[in-house]
Structure formats: structure tokens, C-alpha cells
């Protein structure tokens, strides 16, 4: 895949209304901003710096500054870093225009063209770190991979450069300073951000959160959150500091306050969840319930890794079973080269069937090109999941939902396979399964998990579903 420059550098610029929210929530407003150091450490073409300079100039004007004094302070207190020279120059041009509107010219701006991953001259110096750091997943990082992996928060999973930027930003703060970023909301639940979450809670750094949920303020298809962190001295006495939780209203283009939480409310089982106190209490009851309950299991359906070869309306007469596509509930047939115990049938037997053999020959190279799980043969499914449960009772279920009607619970009796979603393995009757899941309580749970999909949909994993079922059965 060609990686666009936008993707490689994480270059998606922040709209004004989001910049305004971040500055306000961080406390970058009013006369208190004068003579306070502020940086955007990945400033792009200056979306944040423009508003910062505007606020600084209008406060200075209100405070009766001379032009000479303001010119000096703009260069001394406002800082930026941008890796791309052209973007850095655009930022300087834009903030010079803003200063010009206040009659200020020839500022010696401290906006450097450089790499924030290796810049240390701002460490411990900033009152405010504000911005929208780059989001670049580790496999697109190329040159900066080793640099990023150097950071303490970047050790786990499929890391992303924005996680390192939290560490960089926090390092830049003075005691008492404030960081305000907009970054992917995957920081709430990704494995990669595990260390970051633990650090934020251990050190009591979170001050406010605005969950943008499905609203995407950038062209990028990323779900984001605004995080306001406060580097407060004397943390011990503040061990239960509260966090203001907001949601974003895309129509009014502003955040609206929901409630005040503490780490005990929103840090559950290593992840972050934000909602009203009552909803979080319901959620933690489910998440802390565990996944052990007799008589029921939830699993992933077949992963053939080449559905168009295996699934269809086959005239083979043998080695075919009925299947249900969990995401739609639709039935069709599946070429199933396994015996009743789930063992792969020898290819020499399969190819005795002329039609099957012809089909295998036609698709052989594509079948071999799949990234097969270790030990899987080229003519079987890509993964073994779901195969052993074909001859058991189960219900397929669609794991991407917007409303309850999307759940599509379909009974799949013994001998029927499931692909394209999850299945619940149980001998319970359908009414029991439906009464567990077709509830507003389940929809609330799924939305609180915060796994967003486009179009207002949410997804959930087999483990998520199992936890929910176990907690309901234990009630
Ligand atoms: C998401 S954009 C945000 C830009 C700006 N803060 C805004 O909100 O409009 C991230 C910016 O970070 C820059 N960038 C990427 N890696 C960087 C690095 N290692 N050091 C400094 N800037 C970097 C990109 O060139 C891009 O302009």
C-alpha cells in the first residue's frame, strides 16, 4: 500500500472549534496566560499557534503592553516544533499575520524546524503543552521507528507515535503545568497505550476528558478524544483528584459537561471508560464479573481467509455443510474439508470428487497465498477457529451494531457452521438467549465499551459478549 505523506507524518490539521475547546479547557485564556511558556510540539501550519498568539496579543493589549514589550514576549513565551520545513514556515507566516493585526512586526519567533522525538531543550520549562500530535501506527513509522520505541510508553503492542508524544509533552511540563491534546481515543483501550493509562492514573494526571465518540473532526477516519492533563506538584495529597468528563456536541461545536469522576470510576480492568457515574457502576459490575460461566461460551466464526472459494451454492454433493453469515444471518453452503471430529480430510480423498478437484486447481495459488496459521494446510481454512463446534448447538450473532435490531441472533443447529462474526455456544433456547441480549442494558454496555465503527456503529469482541452474558447469568 502506498503510504501518503499525510499518513506517514500524521498530518491532519485541527479545526478552529477544537483548538478553542482545548485552549479553554487547559486554562489558556484570560490575563493568566501572560508570561507563561506554551508550546505546540508538532505545530503543522500553526492551527494552535495562531489562536495562542491571538489570545496572547489581546490579553497583552488589554494589560496595556507597549508594542516592544509584546514583540519580546511573543518570541520568549510562545514555542513550536515542526518536522516539516514548509509547514513550519507556513506556521510562522500565519502567526506573523495574527501579530500584525495587533500592530506587532518582526517577532523573533521560537518556532523550530526539528524532530520533537529528540528535542530536549523544552523539558521541564513549559506551563502549557497544547496541540494535536501526529498519529502514525508503528508499521508506517519507517525512519522514526527506533526513536519511538525508545519511549517508556511505547513498549507494548502496535504502538503509535502519538503515545510517545504524551511522554514528550509531559516531560516538557513544569510542575503545575497543563497539557491539552487531541489524540486517538484508542488510548482508552488499546494494548499499546496500557503503560500510558497506568501512568496517568498512578500519577493522577487526568484533569478533563472530552470524548468525541463517533464525531470525526478530521478527514482521517480516526476516533478522537481531548485529554487535559495536569502536572500537579504534591501529588500524594491529591490522590483522588477529580476529572471533568465532557461529551462533544458536533452541532453546537462545543463540549458539554457530563459529570465529575475519579480514577476509581473510569479506570476499570486496565482500560478507560467515560460515562455518567451510574452507567460506569453498571459497567464495572459487568467487567469485573469474569468470563467463567458453565453451559455457555462465545467464539469467533470460521476464518477461511478466502470466503469466495469456500462459501457458495456448491453442487458438490459431499464435503459441504450449511453455514450462516453472522453479520447478516443469511444461510448458504460451505465447502468443509473436515470430518466430524474436525480433522482435515486428506487431499487425495477430496480430489476424487471431480468438481471439488477442479475448483481446488483453479484456486490453488490464491489459497496458498493466504497467511495461514502455523501448521494449516493450503487446502483447509486459514484458521482453525469454529471448526470443532460445527456439530454443536449455537447462535450466530453480528458483532457490529448500531441498534438492537442489528444483533441478528440466528439459531445454527448441529452441523451448521458460522462465519463472518461470532457465535454463542449453548443449549439454551432462543428465547432465553434473546432475553439476555435484546435489552437496552446490552446496547448501553456495547456503547460504553467505546469501540467505534463508521456510521455510528459499535463493535464488540467474543470476550466482551461473554463477560456480559456471564454477568447477567450470575444475577
Ligand atoms: C496531526 S498534525 C497536527 C498539526 C497541528 N498541531 C494542528 O493541530 O493542526 C501533526 C504534525 O506533526 C508533524 N510531525 C510529525 N512527526 C513529527 C516529529 N517527530 N516532530 C515534530 N513534528 C512532527 C507533522 O508534520 C504534522 O504537521
Image: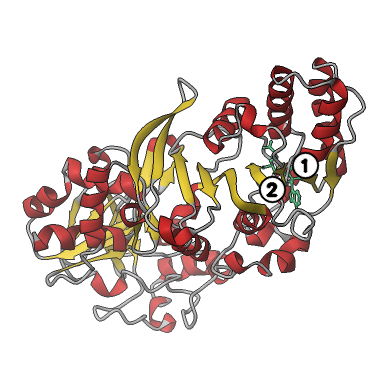
Depth check: give the residue in front, 423 or 236.
Answer: 236
Residue at 50% across, 58% down: 234
Disc with the residue nearer the chain's start (2 vs 1): 1
Say above or below: 73 vs 236: above
Residue 385 position within the rendered picture, expressed as x and y whole percent measured from the top left: 35, 71
Say above or below: 403 vs 424: above
Element type where label 2 sits in the image: strand
Check residue 79 in the rendering and tell me which mark sits there, or answer none: 1
Depth check: give the residue in front, 350 or 167.
Answer: 167
Depth check: give the residue in front, 3 or 100.
Answer: 100
Q: CA distance from mark 2 to mark 1?
A: 9 Å
Callout in the foreground (2, 1): 2
Residue 231 position within the rendered picture, expressed as x and y whole percent measured from the top left: 55, 53
Residue at 40% across, 51% down: 241
Say above or below: 458 vs 362: above
Check residue 265 in the rendering and tell me which mark sits there, or answer none: none
According to the picture, the residue beneath numbered tag 2 turns out to be 126
Residue 461 position within the rendered picture, expressed as x and y whole percent measured from the top left: 34, 58
Residue 38 position within the rendered picture, expressed as x and y whole percent measured from the top left: 70, 41
Q: Are marks 2 and 1 in contact (CB under 8 Å)?
A: yes
Mark 1, ligand 1, within 8 Å: the answer is no
User: Can residue 132 be seen here?
Assistant: no
Residue at 48% across, 61% down: 203
* Residue found at the very far right of the displayed protein: 106
Amino acid at each position: 500500500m502506498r503510504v501518503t505523506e499525510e499518513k506517514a507524518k500524521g498530518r491532519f490539521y485541527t479545526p478552529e472549534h477544537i483548538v478553542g475547546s482545548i485552549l479553554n479547557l487547559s486554562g489558556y485564556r484570560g490575563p493568566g496566560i501572560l508570561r507563561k511558556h506554551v508550546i505546540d510540539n508538532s505545530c503543522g501550519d500553526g492551527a494552535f499557534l495562531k489562536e495562542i498568539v491571538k489570545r496572547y496579543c489581546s490579553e497583552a493589549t488589554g494589560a496595556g503592553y507597549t508594542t516592544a514589550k509584546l514583540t519580546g514576549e511573543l518570541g520568549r513565551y510562545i514555542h513550536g516544533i515542526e518536522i516539516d520545513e514548509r509547514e513550519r514556515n507556513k506556521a510562522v507566516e500565519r502567526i506573523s499575520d495574527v501579530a500584525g493585526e495587533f500592530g506587532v512586526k518582526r517577532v523573533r519567533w521560537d518556532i523550530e524546524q526539528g524532530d520533537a522525538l529528540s528535542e530536549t531543550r523544552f523539558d521541564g520549562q513549559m506551563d502549557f503543552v497544547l496541540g494535536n500530535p501526529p498519529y502514525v501506527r508503528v508499521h508506517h513509522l519507517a525512519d522514526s521507528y527506533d526513536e519511538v520505541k525508545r519511549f517508556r510508553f511505547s513498549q507494548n503492542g502496535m504502538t503509535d507515535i502519538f503515545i510517545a508524544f504524551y511522554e514528550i509533552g509531559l516531560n516538557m511540563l513544569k510542575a503545575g503545568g497543563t497539557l491539552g491534546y487531541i489524540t486517538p481515543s484508542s488510548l482508552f483501550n488499546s494494548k499499546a497505550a496500557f503503560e500510558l493509562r497506568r501512568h496517568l492514573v498512578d500519577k493522577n494526571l487526568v484533569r478533563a476528558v472530552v470524548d468525541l465518540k463517533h464525531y470525526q473532526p478530521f478527514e482521517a477516519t480516526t476516533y478522537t478524544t481531548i485529554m487535559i492533563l495536569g502536572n500537579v506538584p504534591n501529588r500524594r495529597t491529591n490522590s483522588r483528584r477529580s476529572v471533568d468528563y465532557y461529551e462533544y456536541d458536533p452541532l453546537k461545536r462545543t463540549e458539554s459537561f457530563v459529570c465529575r469522576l475519579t480514577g476509581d470510576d473510569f479506570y476499570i480492568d486496565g482500560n478507560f471508560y467515560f460515562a455518567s457515574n451510574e452507567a460506569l457502576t453498571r459497567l464495572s459490575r459487568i467487567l469485573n464479573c469474569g468470563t467463567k460461566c458453565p453451559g455457555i461460551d462465545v467464539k469467533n466464526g470460521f476464518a477461511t481467509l478466502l470466503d469466495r472459494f469456500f462459501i457458495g451454492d456448491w453442487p458438490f454433493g459431499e464435503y459441504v455443510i450449511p453455514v450462516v453469515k453472522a453479520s447478516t444471518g443469511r444461510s448458504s453452503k460451505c465447502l468443509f474439508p473436515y470430518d466430524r471430529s474436525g480433522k482435515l480430510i486428506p487431499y487425495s480423498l477430496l480430489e476424487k470428487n471431480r468438481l471439488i478437484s477442479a475448483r481446488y486447481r483453479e484456486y490453488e495459488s490464491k489459497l496458498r497465498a493466504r497467511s495461514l496459521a502455523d501448521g494449516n494446510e493450503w487446502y483447509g481454512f486459514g484458521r482453525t477457529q469454529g471448526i470443532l463446534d460445527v456439530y454443536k448447538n449455537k447462535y450466530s450473532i453480528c458483532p457490529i451494531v448500531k441498534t438492537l435490531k442489528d444483533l441478528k441472533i440466528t439459531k445454527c443447529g448441529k452441523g451448521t457452521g458460522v462465519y463472518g462474526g461470532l457465535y454463542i455456544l449453548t443449549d439454551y433456547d432462543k428465547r432465553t438467549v434473546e432475553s439476555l441480549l435484546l435489552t437496552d442494558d446490552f446496547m448501553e454496555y456495547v456503547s460504553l465499551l467505546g469501540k467505534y465503527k463508521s456510521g455510528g456503529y459499535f463493535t464488540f469482541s467474543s470476550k466482551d459478549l461473554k463477560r456480559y452474558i456471564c454477568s447477567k447469568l450470575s444475577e
